[in-house]
């Protein structure tokens, strides 16, 4: 995982965290269709992955006593373009060769959103839920994986993909700082698919914040 952060107009790049409010119940917003498996064809439902990731992010912000972030089509489009470029290039980078979107700042400016603070998180996870655990390859040709105890490991759904990438980010101090920045008001996320990655493919995920 990698992150990049910018602050404009002398905004100090330090996040101020509020203490969690014990009386507030932080519940995950239901995203219709998020239990569907992300297709191996790479034809990702961009609005669905954006909504699923935003729902997970807002739970983390609620736990920190922060307000919810709203959707931003421009941010999601920029994030999707960058994620797909990373998947094609098979690399994790905040710089790209996409005209007009070669840097985090360029991507944020391409949205047309008036912002004073912005940041980007990126990540890569396997298509199947094998990251961070010991697993067995039952049949590589058919992508059959299992836990060491023998339980089958399925391909990610939109919801499980969103939860996994947000958990990775929230457990990384710099990514967490972006996620819990009180200055940002909106977020957009996107994903790209690399079918040639080991263990039956991998998703590259990009996320942009602005406020």
Image: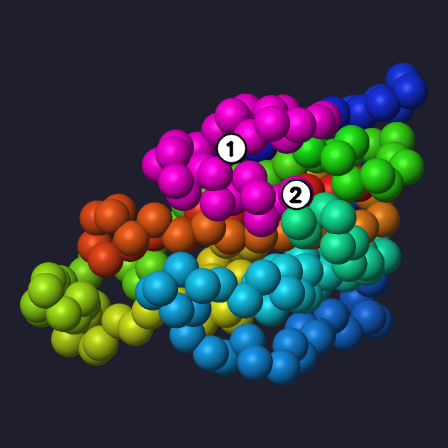
Q: Considering the image in quadrants, where does the C terminus appear?
A: top right
Q: In percent of the image, x 82 and y 70: which residue is there? A: 24
The one nearer the camera, 18 or 2, is 2
Q: Quadrant of residue 90?
A: top left
Count of numbered circles on the image: 2
Residue 92 among magenta residues:
yes
Q: Position of residue 174 (x, y in %)?
A: 61, 33
Q: CA distance from mark 1 to mark 2?
A: 17 Å
**What residue sits right under mark 2 in the picture?**
78
Secondary structure found at label 2? helix
Q: In percent of the image, x 34 and y 49: which residue is there? A: 194
**Whether residue 148 is situated above or below residue 57 in the rendered picture:** below
Q: Position of residue 151 (x, y in %)?
A: 21, 77
Q: Which residues are magenta?
A: 78-106
Disc 1 vs disc 2: which is toward the camera?
A: 2
Dot 1: within a 10 Å radius of its alpha carbon, few (fewer than 14), some, or many (20 or more) residues? Answer: some
Farthest-out residue, top = 10
Secondary structure found at label 1? strand
Q: Position of residue 87 (x, y in %)?
A: 40, 43
The one nearer the camera, 161 or 106, is 106
Dots 1 and 2: beta carbons under 8 Å? no
What label does residue 2 carry, if any? 1
**Whether residue 194 is situated above or below residue 130 in the rendered picture:** above
Query: Is there any visible trace of residue 90 in the rendered image?
Result: yes
Q: In percent of the image, x 88 and y 31: which residue is there? A: 116
**Whether residue 36 is situated above or below residue 191 in the rendered picture:** below
């Amino acid at each position: 995982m990698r992150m990049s952060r910018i602050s404009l107009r002398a905004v100090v790049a330090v996040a101020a965290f509020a203490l969690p409010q014990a009386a507030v119940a932080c519940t995950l917003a239901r995203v219709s269709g998020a239990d569907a498996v992300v297709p191996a064809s790479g034809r990702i439902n961009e609005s669905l992955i954006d909504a699923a990731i935003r729902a997970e992010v807002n739970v983390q912000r609620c736990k920190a006593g922060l307000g919810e972030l709203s959707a931003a089509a421009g941010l999601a489009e920029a994030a999707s373009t960058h994620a797909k470029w990373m998947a094609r290039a098979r690399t994790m980078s905040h710089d790209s060769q996409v005209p007009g979107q070669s840097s985090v700042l360029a991507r944020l400016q391409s949205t047309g959103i008036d912002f004073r603070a912005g940041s980007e998180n990126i990540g890569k996870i396997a298509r199947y839920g094998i990251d961070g655990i010991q697993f067995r390859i039952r049949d590589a040709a058919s992508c059959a994986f299992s836990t060491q105890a023998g339980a089958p490991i399925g391909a990610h759904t939109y919801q499980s993909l969103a939860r996994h990438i947000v958990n990775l980010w929230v457990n990384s101090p710099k990514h967490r700082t972006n996620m819990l920045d009180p200055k940002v008001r909106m977020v957009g996320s996107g994903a790209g698919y690399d079918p040639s990655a080991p263990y039956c493919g991998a998703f590259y995920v990009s996320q942009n914040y602005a406020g």
